[in-house]
């Protein structure tokens, strides 16, 4: 058991605070002889990195990852994994802790300030300390390793809702997700969001979002019954991301509103001897085990709690105060949650691939 | 790691198939010297028990629980826990496995038949075997023990949506949840559902539902950051229940649609020196740690997959077939999910209470 | 984490007290499609069963095992495992709890009476409750399943020392271990022990022993570095058995007394392309990973603490008392530790086989 | 589950190879508000550090520890723990990997070279890679944190046997362990060892040792029954240290040779209302739970496998070769195992203190 580890056979442990010296993770259980490079890991981190458009926090972090162990350097500068723990570190370079001195004692509404103090009696208030979304850089690094484990599986993700504005499923083209600053698979909606979010940003406000993550190429049989369901572990993974308030698999909450006839994914026999499902209401998981269809997860991210409008709160002395957060923040933190959701999907799948192989050969 | 265990310090392991000799669980880590009785555990099982109204399966199971270990019998017939593993067993008495002989080789759409075969190459088809919701009786028994651990916390739950019909929040009266066969806290909606579900049942159809579970009296400080968030473990717990497709905390998916100003739970100082939150959008969890507010979780249950209308499918020989399920089933399996959701809430909270005490004294 | 579970991928949880209704275990993670029968499991339990000679406790327990879940019955009465948790139960039939009423409040020296009370503030004193060696029946049942997992590995075990009397390694014939009541592989020493232990028994005394367990056919590569070493897990497994005070691998403590030259297991190339080790000082484990040689473990069991000679102690009220234990006990509890040691060896190997397969395919 | 983590509530994960960039550990679950400093952690590392006398390897490593997370710096340069994961790193500075180029393909007898290759199909041969005792620096750092958790417990350790030479228990004076290069508590024997080991060293040979670790001030009640016994976890902890071949608790293997009367630790009532044990054969653990007496563990370390005398072996191509190890090594690696044994004792106790508090308050 560990409060800062995720997974079982493919397992990672993260550490580090927003304004400490560094942050990182240790990935344990990775199979040996997988080829990987720092550049490849970096490419995923760059996708999550702050300061890439006016729609994400202006904190300037190189987020340069260093692989410290668990690999054998090859002559071309790439690595082979050795099966040993892979330690990765990212040094913090652009902390501006003094931005936070105002709120050292103040509990920002919607933040973990009050609860950390209530639990631990001490709190690293600089940039949110451990509760900062900065921790998610370590997840993305772990996810880069996980992707190597589940070779053959492809993962795509994007924003499917920003504030009240949902994408039009008819217009979805996943090829376009990197063509806009929102990872939005609906190019027309992406345009509309641009104006919308600019308004939110200028008002010092923030807004929530829904992210969809889809894994293709997952064979039937990953996951496990009862308390190690694939969808259960995906729910756990996504809910562990900062600011996430809801998770759904396949048709999710919509399933509550329809009948058994409408919800049934009928099956026919494919020419290749594999079953062909006529729909994917289940989101690729039946009884906790993958069916061979796309694994589809969505999660809701709340609006960034750090806003410029003052909100009523208290401080650690019990005084009533008004809190306004001046630091550098994302108007829609959901945007940067996209590569994080992908990483968590990869990690859950890698873990279940190894677990499946362990029990079933 | 275990595929059939849940929790860490308060941990239970379940076993048993729908049509085997018995099912049960072993609860490990329970604190000593808690007073409990078989009658009390039974009372929770009775709430989940099938055959209590025409709206739940007509399988007749006494679901009589026997406590086999971990307790010291007292003179009045009650027990004191000893800190040792508590083994509880429920014998199956009304299996009618022959009802299932038709489908021994057929993959029922929406069921785990295909995926279990794909994973294990063998499957106990009798009544769904291990994938049957019958396993949840063991959870309810474990939950009864968990409630003793979190003395002072009260848990209530009910159906807040059946098919497309949502309750009216203005009319909610939690005192009335046991006055109708749906655990519905809106007495007027409960009446409407009665007619609605009767139609569904007579048509051999089924319908989904949304369940809300609320825990009051949870002190600030339970849960843990990053990968042991209280809301993460609740999401995992609820998603592990059969047929669940989505989970949300507090305002959940609604949070995606609103702004930071709207989403902030402002705080004032209470007369008792404790913070008073002016709203509970967060669902009682901030940064993965309880805030002292009500912990609020909702989960979506899909419609029962066993329906009388034939659906297209295949069998284990790869033949295309039509499947119609004749066994005894619930038209809205969400109803019986209510006591299960309560039990899982209790188990998550008990685990986190002990974990918090371990680290923080 | 669990106080009453052992293993990770092949994992079992035991429950039950000496004088409760029953005891048992739940084996989780077993691969599917393994053939097993209750008779086979019973055969291992019979080897551990009390009352088989005058040298083991006269408590008469049938120790009849019932498999409650996780298997699909075949037409010939045998089972196939399904990959689901295997619950096994043994009912207690010959408890004589009143034998223990004298010592309900007295702390027997060498027993766990005082420490259980100190830890839990409550204690099931009947027959030692959970701390009784009766729990080991559940391990033996789990071990029977584990042996199926590690098909191709053979495990033998025997007493190599009783009191001060060690076997002569020159005379060892493992074929003879079942020809004497001590599982002694040295037939001449077995004869000597017979007279020796009879004297101990008649004196109401007891004596310690050393058990050796050897697994042949373990391929190179099981185990894992650092904190999941094969020898580490074997040490943990054996030390978890009641009354065990020491564990050693290969030449064990002897290694401390010799030089690097003497200790080196030199290697030559075998005709079959596999390495041939010229000695086995290492006990088949190098760097925590199996080398392909026999895995050799020894553990020391202390003399049964229950003896007829009064010993000074205190009771739970803090009064000084003299304690003499009248129940039915083994003059050398090490004898019955032999099948338990075999079972734990099987469980550790099964777990590591699955773990190896998980990470390395 | 994790191959490179140890403990449950107080849990650490280590990473790093002998000749990589760095090594380190992440300590998770540490209680908040404990005062610690880098200097204090360093003091334990210095005790383990190589190159301190002619009797340990001449590799020159500063072993300077850096605390990267989980603490809040105080004005005086010390830290307070925050309850967050504590990441500690030690950079490697004196790797001479070319010393090892000869043996890149050769399997050194007694080393893990062959088994790592057999398991992973790849191996970091530089300085033994992950199987090097260099990993133990990370344990010592974790142990420094653990000592803070078990405030009030004191841990002492020393060499009680080197090669065939055992200390004389009559002459033991624990105050003198730091007065000789062997951590030997018998000053006269320490002198004899000096000449003895110098001979071994000059001959390019090596020798084994036995280390004793004693924890005083452990209250009654730590540990847990059955599979989380305090002595079981100590056995696991010590056996996980490189080169350890045997572990014993209290009188250990001696218990096998004596009778129940001789082995009983009789109990009288102390003036302070606490039990007074008249002997400590049990080593402070009864039924897996601490009794309040000193917790006493001994472990046997084999002679360093790297010796100058050529030994027969094979290489990874299956060729027969003679192997002589030229790198810098310890003639008695058991010496440096002393601070490592202390660290592991501290970590086991810290974990069980938190686990006890979790379940029993």
Image: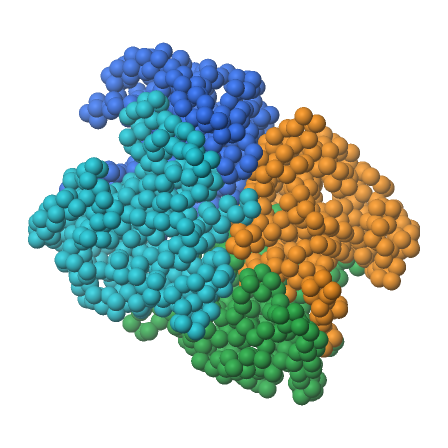
Chain colours: A blue, B cyan, C green, D orange
Q: Judge from the rendering whether residue D323 lies leftward or rightward of residue B129; answer left or right.
A: right
- In which quarter of the view is residue C209 placed? bottom right
Residue D324 in view: no
Identify which residue is drawn at 77% across, 41% down: D47
Measured as percent of width and height from the top left, residue B209 is found at 21, 44
- Report the front residue among C205 and A153: C205
Instruction: Identify the residue shown where x is 28% and y is 67%.
Output: B92
Residue A346 screen position, x and y as percent: 41, 36
Q: Residue at x 34, y 62 (%)?
A: B40
Q: In this picture, is D225 found above or below D32?
A: below
Query: In this picture, is A264 found above or below C52?
Result: above
Give the x, y percent position of residue C138: 48, 69
Q: Residue at x 80, y 53 (%)?
A: D159
Is residue B176 shown left or right of residue C255?
A: left
**Could you tell me if residue D292 is visible in this image?**
yes
Q: Is D183 left or right of C242, judged from the image as shown?
A: right
């Amino acid at each position: 058991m560990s409060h800062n580890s995720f997974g079982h056979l493919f397992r990672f442990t993260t550490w580090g605070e927003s304004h400490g010296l560094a942050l990182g993770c240790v990935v344990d259980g990775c199979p040996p002889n997988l080829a990987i490079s720092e550049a490849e890991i970096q490419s995923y981190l760059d996708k999550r990195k702050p300061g890439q458009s006016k729609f994400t926090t202006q904190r300037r972090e190189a987020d340069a990852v260093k692989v410290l162990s668990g690999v054998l350097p090859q002559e071309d500068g790439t690595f082979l994994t050795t099966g040993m723990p892979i330690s990765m570190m990212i040094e913090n370079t652009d902390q501006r802790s003094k931005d936070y001195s105002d709120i050292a004692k103040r509990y920002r509404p919607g933040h973990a300030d009050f609860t950390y103090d209530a639990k631990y009696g001490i709190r690293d208030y600089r940039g949110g300390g451990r509760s900062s979304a900065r921790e998610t850089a370590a997840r993305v690094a772990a996810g880069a390793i996980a992707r190597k484990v589940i070779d053959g599986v492809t993962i795509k993700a994007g924003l499917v809702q920003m504030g009240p504005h949902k994408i039009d499923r008819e217009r979805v083209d996943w090829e376009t997700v990197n063509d806009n600053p929102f990872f939005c698979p609906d190019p027309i909606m992406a345009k509309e969001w641009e104006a919308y979010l600019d308004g939110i940003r200028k008002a010092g406000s923030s807004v929530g979002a829904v992210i969809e993550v889809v894994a293709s190429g997952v064979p039937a049989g990953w996951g496990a019954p009862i308390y190690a369901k694939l969808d259960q572990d995906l729910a756990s993974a996504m809910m562990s991301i900062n600011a996430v308030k809801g998770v759904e698999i396949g048709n999710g909450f919509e399933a509550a509103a329809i009948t058994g006839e409408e919800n049934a994914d009928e099956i026919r026999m494919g020419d290749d001897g594999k079953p062909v499902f006529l729909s994917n209401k289940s989101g690729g998981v039946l009884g906790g085990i993958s069916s061979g269809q796309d694994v589809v997860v969505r999660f809701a991210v709340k609006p960034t709690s750090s806003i410029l409008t003052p909100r009523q709160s208290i401080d650690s002395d019990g005084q009533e105060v008004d809190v306004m957060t001046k630091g550098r923040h994302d108007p829609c933190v959901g945007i940067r949650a996209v590569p994080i959701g992908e990483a968590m999907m990869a990690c859950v799948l890698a873990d279940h691939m190894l677990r499946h192989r362990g029990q079933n050969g």
